[in-house]
Image: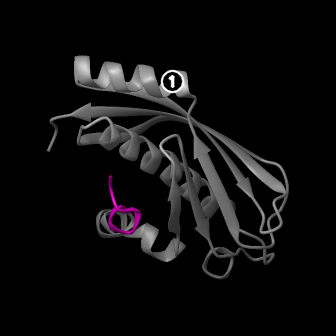
Amino acid sequence: MMDLAKLAEQVRDAIPLTRHLDFQLETFDGQSLTLTAPLAPNHNDKGTFFAGSQSALLTLAGWSLTTLLARQAGATADVVAVETGLKYLLPLDSDMHITASASADDIHRFEQRLQRRGKATLSILAQGTSANGTQVCEYQGLYLARIGLP
């Protein structure tokens, strides 16, 4: 299994913007991934969590989960976001916690298609919450994983 700290470091090396978000990949249980990020480097002019940072972190959580699930299936794949949707429900005035997940059926289908065809899509659902657990945003993303690309 992939070390989460190592994956986070690979992301920071490949995508300079992510270095400023100060995110941490916290846990991966085979079906979901949790990610956290502090308010301090991500605040806007109102002192709340910047919407652009939220969008970047949610997209990153979906990408990371898809990457981890491909690796769990025994494949090293190039992963890209194909489609995303994000609803901001409440202002966030604390650190952000994100849980990204996919259904067991979708994961199974993803793994089968990835092994059989060398590419597969996966639908990710993610929820952003405040430090006290209040939901502040909801995200849906479709990711494509392809094996064998540089």
Instruction: Give x and y (percent) for residue 46.
Output: 81, 75
Q: Is residue 87 left or right of residue 35?
A: right
Query: Image point 53% across, 70% down: which residue?
Result: 23
Asked which secondary structure carries label 1, the reply is helix
Instruction: Give x and y (percent) for residue 115.
Output: 25, 24
> In terms of depth relative to the viewer, which is nearer, 12 or 45?
12
Q: Quadrant of the C terminus?
A: top left
Residue 2 is covered by the magenta coloring:
yes
Q: Residues within 10 Å of mark 1 (few under 14, many from 20)?
A: some
Q: Pick out the residue farthest to the bottom.
A: 40
Q: Is residue 24 left or right of residue 7?
A: right
Q: Is residue 1 above or below residue 117?
A: below
Q: Is residue 91 above or below residue 124?
A: below
Q: Is residue 78 left or right of residue 36?
A: left
Region of the chain picked out in magenta, as a range? 1-7
Query: Image point 29% across, 25% down: which residue?
Result: 114
Q: Is residue 41 above or below residue 21?
A: below
What scheme was used to colour the molecule? Answer: one colour
What residue did someone put label 1 on?
106
Residue type highlighted by circle 1: Asp
> In terms of depth relative to the viewer, which is nearer, 103 or 58?
103
Quarter occupied by residue 34:
bottom right
What is the total number of numbered labels drawn onto the structure image?
Answer: 1
Q: Is residue 46 left or right of residue 15?
A: right
> In terms of depth relative to the viewer, which is nearer, 99 or 55?
99
Query: Image point 26% across, 32% down: which residue?
Result: 146
Residue 42 is covered by the magenta coloring:
no
Instruction: Give x and y (percent) for residue 135.
Output: 81, 52
Instruction: Give x and y (percent) for residue 48.
Output: 78, 72
